Image (cartoon, rainbow, N blue to C red):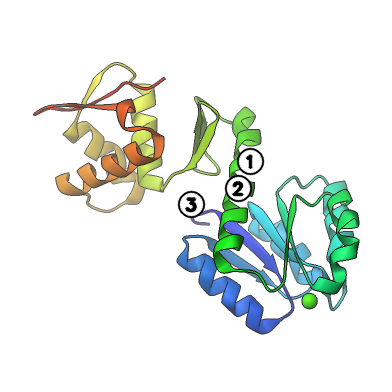
Amino acid sequence: MSGKTRLLIVEDDIFLQDGLRDLLTRDGYEVLLAGSLNEARLGLAEGDPHLLILDVGLPDGNGFAFCQEIREQGYELPVLFLTARDEEYELVRGLNAGGDDYLCKPFRALELLSRIKALLRRAGSMYQLATREGLNYSRLQYAAGGQCVQLTPTEFALLEKFLHNRGQILTREQLLASIWDHEGQFIDDNTLSVHISRLRDKIGRESIETVRGIGYRWRGI
Ligand code: CA
């Protein structure tokens, strides 16, 4: 399983399924697909998704009932319903069944992406309890100051190194060594700078101080 955020899409409309898969894959998610509730049960158990996108009218049952079913089983992942207009009147039922949000078809791609991000962010703050030093090892997320950010495996490895060596200057060589093993591929000096820069963008520029000619030092909380 990759370090990407996994979304399980349960949708029986093949064209919509295809479109959603392309859109969400392009946006950096790992996408699992199900066309029925039976496939959804399997995808949920085997894929361990971070978020569920759930159509309401499915060939073997109703998405609202399915949501209630998985909540009773203890699944806590965010659920976003995709509803047809004539199902809108039932939405209260869906939200009562443990759904987190909904979109009516047809919807705009950007709207879907922003809802997904919001749900993941909200859920991320709940996962903080299961982390060490704000690092969530199973989801490659970092939570601090009320924010939760998704990291790549390399960014996660770098951040872990910084957090375990607070206040110390880490040389570029030390940092390179810590990410070498993680991805099993050669990462050169320039690539290290790029990863540090991206990490700063995500967690705050001031968190990582550049020590000129030597390396970097953690300055965050
Ligand atoms: Ca449907």
Residue at the spot 31% in from the left edge and 27% down from the top edge: 206
Q: Is residue 149 above or below residue 27?
A: above
For badge 2, the amino acid type reads Ala
Name the quadrant containing residue 80.
bottom right
Name the quadrant containing residue 20.
bottom right
Q: Secondary structure at mark 1?
A: helix
Question: In this view of the protein, which residue sits in the foreground, 151 or 112?
Answer: 112
Question: Residue at label 3?
Answer: 3
Question: In this view of the protein, which residue sits in the foreground, 173 or 124?
Answer: 124
How dense is the environment of label 1, judged by Cα within 10 Å: few (below 14), some, or many (20 and up)? some
How dense is the environment of label 2, judged by Cα within 10 Å: few (below 14), some, or many (20 and up)? few
User: Residue 123's spot in the image, x, y percent?
Assistant: 65, 41
Is the Cβ of the residue at disc 1 closer than 8 Å to that at disc 2? yes
Between disc 1 and disc 3, the foreground one is 1
For badge 3, the amino acid type reads Gly
Q: Secondary structure at mark 2?
A: helix
Question: Residue at label 2?
Answer: 118
Q: Earlier in the sequence, mark 1 or mark 3?
A: 3
185 relative to 88 in the view: left or right = left
Residue at the spot 57% in from the left edge and 68% down from the top edge: 109
Q: Quadrant of ligand 1?
A: bottom right
Question: Residue at label 1?
Answer: 122
Measured Cα–Cα span from mark 1 to mark 2: 6 Å
Q: Earlier in the sequence, mark 2 or mark 3?
A: 3
Residue at the spot 83% in from the left edge and 56% down from the top edge: 67
Measured Cα–Cα span from mark 1 to mark 3: 19 Å
Between disc 2 and disc 3, the foreground one is 2
Measured Cα–Cα span from mark 2 to mark 3: 19 Å
